[in-house]
Amino acid sequence: MTPIGDSMRVPGYGLTSSHPRVNFVFDNQPLQGIEGESLSAALLANEIRLIGRSFKFHRPRGIVSIGSEEPNALVTIERPTGSEPNNRATMVRVYAGLTVKSQNHWPSLENDVGALIGYFGPLLPAGFYYKTFMSPSRAWHFYERVIRRMAGLGKVPEQPDSDFSTKIHVHCDLLVAGGGAAGLASALAAGRAGARVILADENPWFGLGLLDENHTIDGIQAYEWAKQTINELASLPNVTVAPNTTVIGRYEDGFVTMIETLRDAPNLTGDRTPRFRFWKVRSKSTIMATGALERPLIFPNNDRPGVMLATAVSGYLNRYGVLAGKQIIIFTNNSIGHRTASAISNTQAEVVSIIDSRPESLGPWERANLTKGIPIRWQSKVFNTRGRKNISGTLVGSIEGQRREWLDCDLLAISGGFSPTISLYAHTGGKAVWNEGRGTFLPGLSENNFTAVGLCNEDQTLYDSLVNGYKAGQLAASNQNYRPDRTWSPTVIGDDLLATFDPITPLIQDSQSNKAFVDFQNDVTAADMSLAVREGYRSIEHVKRYTTLGMGTDQGKLGNVNGIELIANARGEAVQQVGTTRFRPPVVPTSMSAIAGVLDEHLTHPMRRTAAHQLHEEAGAVWVNAGAWLRPQFYRCSGESDVDAVNREVTMVRNNVGLGDVATLGKFEIWGPDSMAFLEKVYMNNFSSLPIGKGRYGVMLREDGMVYDDGVTSRLGEHHFLMNTSTGNTNSVFEWMTQLLETRWNSLRVAIVPVTDQWFAAALVGPNARKVLNRVVEGLDVSNNDFPFMGVRSGKVAGIPARIFRISFSGEISYEINVPTDYGKSLWLSLMEAGKPEQLTPNGVESMGVLRIEKGHFVVGREADGRTNPYDVGLGRMVSTKKWFIGKEALRLPIMSDVSRRQLVGIVPIKTGERLPYSAHLVSASQPTNLAGSQGWITSLTYSPTLGHDIALALLENGRSRIGEELVASAPIAGHSVGVQVVSPQFFDPNGKRQNA
């Protein structure tokens, strides 16, 4: 009995044949595969042909290719922590426990109701959605729901991505993109010369194209030569070999991005191994050795499962030892199809016939196939296919349409020539040039420090690829003053044809057929191309968007050249006149989490800790990242929940006294005769009247009038100020101010020194704060008469020289005590000891947030989100009319004070005790589900233990004039809606009596 998953395997073939067998699941069906092989290979080995459904018509789809160009076989990977849609089965590696599901069907892959759409295909041509659903207009919301439900392929996961990625910045003399014969030769030449080389390829193995070749290089079998070359490169200290790494983008000045897959299996051990690594490379030279992709042939029903590219068929055999079928027909217009037939004929599979559109052409592979007795039909083509969930027959005949007959088969291997992969060349603006004789687009004008070699530069033979690749590597090394060795002239024995670049054979007489597919994923047909031309679309970019040609996950890697040829034929123009669509990075689909990554924080962004960090740890602090700082979020007592801890801290501050660590706030000492003039320019409100010994709240704006940052600046002397900024904006504000002084206002006599690290700050807050401070202050009267709100004093606290600022973020009596950082721990201990009679409680940033929402203070990054001006947050009266400041011109625009803008308001639930939803939009109570009518959104939300119910700050259209109005807070993702009332944003002590007491 043949073991599960072995019925299509060929002994003696494949790079993974010695790997262990593992179990995996596809659509709830337990299967067996070989660890490390591609999921597509494992599915073919298990005789699974139907993998998914197409985007538009939900037609059955199977595996077409073997690499990242795959348009059909998209699957969702199910992980313990969530799902990941739209993975190409050709790029997913099999591991024990892999669970995948097919996509875009209901109720099942085998029986998809959506396939009924195909019967209405003639009514749904290219661009149909631009012409239908236009009336009646009131029905659009119904249409929209239906269209959105049908759109897409995989389902977007609701859970956050549990994996994480890392990133790396590197420099090199030469980056080689592609690890085939030409790429290996380039890296070898430069590496031997001593140049710093990075060699990247998207596959786990290098030189995979050489597996198909039946010849030797310098007396060594071709793939063995590739393995020896990689071993040599890996042994060189100046060479970095990067398998599983795709070069996804090329930019100006040698900047290149790459994405590396570090693991496929989910990380269940907790060792924090990243899944992806995002490379940012600065390379002095780049060699593009990305090869060429085989093109499909276009004929009616060319999209059935079981229709595959010829190179993919031979690739699955040679890489994985898997046959894609047992009864095979080859349809080709070049010699590579014959090479595939020859390879298959050495296995248990039957080559039924080779259908060749050319006149009789007897090259080495053709003669070999005739010798083996394989039937060859010259000047013939495929007219149609049959079969439901897999191809079962092919209608073949002469090109003229005579002598047609059906041939049974379970696999149709097609080869329509090759298209060089030139995306990297085009990313920086390089224009592809159509070569009529070659029937393909090639790189145009050469660029400095960039070279294309191998198949992507029409080197059709192995010998040319090796020689030209080696020369390019030598040149790149010599340009960086390395001394490469002598020119290498390899000895290649055997037919060394890698691919053919021939004129496209005009096989599409049935170009009006709405079932002759050009773009498999999006169901774009030859008829759609013709329709776009008849409807007047001239630009290829417009045709692309009208028909969706090349707009799927494969970005037209297989279908675009055929589509361009069809457009040229329909318009009676040369292909060069039609041109290509614009190539944009990334080359392959790349997850946002992989691009974002996480830096190795201990090396690049060390986490900053305040002087009292250890004391917070001992007090039971739960930590939270705040910019570059680690801050106490709250302090949990034994048996206490997180919410209870925050409520306790808030209640203690409101009714007694609390102590918070505020050392992370940005601090800048500003000196100089022109210091006041500088402050007047960067703040929107007046500072010229600020006396010594007082502080003033100030707001900075961007040039566009939007709030940039805020904080209190205190005057310590005639020309001496201390500026406070928000924690998150400390660095950016310093860079901004420094740039202003160096470029725009370089005549101002001002010095700015960042002193955040030099001072520790603790905020003593609450009705009893003055009582606690009196026990430790020396030589200073802290009564309200002598030390009023916004006052600044210098003295000693617990014997430590200190600056004391009476600033309140909470609306309570508050003293921010600043001491040299080395004394921070001592100050904290002294204050906690002095507050024991009042049971002084430390409070974290979470309770600070509750206190500021109760008081109605906005914060940068929430209410001030980059689109908010001072009028929006209720600070219009602060805007000076007597001076110039940054952003003043923008504030004069009528739109900036338009009452329709979203303004800061408070929100409370209508029903006491109801919880407000996070990230909710505010909509009319008469249309609570119509998010298109969103009038604003909640920016900050909390439960107020002071008031006993939820409260929120929000930005609402014309909000200040709508106090008392009732709306609905709707969060559709959470499925939660609550009736709310608009109130003043100052929920607690609106007149400020407590902070001024």
Image: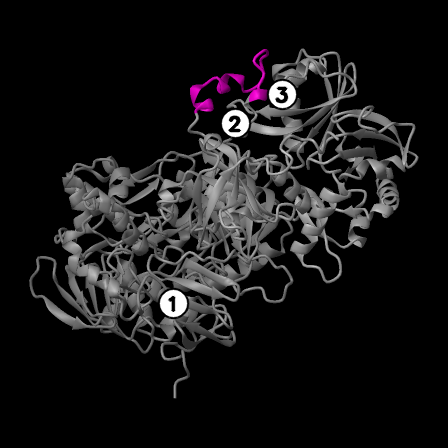
In three-dimensional space, the C-alpha distance between marks 3 and 2, rounded to whole angstroms, equals 13 Å
Toward the viewer: 869 or 133? 869
Q: Which mark is residue 869?
A: 2
Q: Which quadrant: the C terminus?
A: top right
Which amino acid type is shown beneath numbered disc 2?
A: Asn
Q: Determine whether the residue tagged by mark 1 lies in a helix, strand or loop.
A: helix
Q: Determine whether, in the image, residue 341 is placed left or right of residue 472.
A: left
Which amino acid type is shown beneath numbered disc 1?
A: Tyr
Q: Which residues are magenta?
A: 877-898
Q: Are marks 3 and 1 in contact (CB under 8 Å)?
A: no
Question: Mark 3, mark 1: which one is toward the viewer?
Answer: 3
Toward the viewer: 992 or 142? 992
Residue 529 spot, x, y in % from top left: 19, 46
N-term mark: 1 or 2: 1
**Magenta region includes residue 936:** no
Residue 523 visible in the current orientation? yes
Question: Mark 1, mark 2: which one is toward the viewer?
Answer: 2
In three-dimensional space, the C-alpha distance between marks 3 and 1, rounded to whole angstroms, equals 67 Å
Q: Kindly indicate the quadrant of the structure image that contains residue 134.
A: top left
Residue 240 spot, x, y in % from top left: 59, 51
Q: Determine whether the residue tagged by mark 2 lies in a helix, strand or loop.
A: loop
Q: Residue furthest left?
A: 402
**Magenta region includes residue 885:** yes
Residue 43 spot, x, y in % from top left: 38, 71
**Which residue is denoted by mark 1 in the rendering?**
316
**Which residue is denoted by mark 3 in the rendering?**
683
User: Which residue is rendered at x = 52% and y = 23% of the image?
Assistant: 705
Above-or-below relation of 741 to 130: above
Above-or-below relation of 308 to 840: below
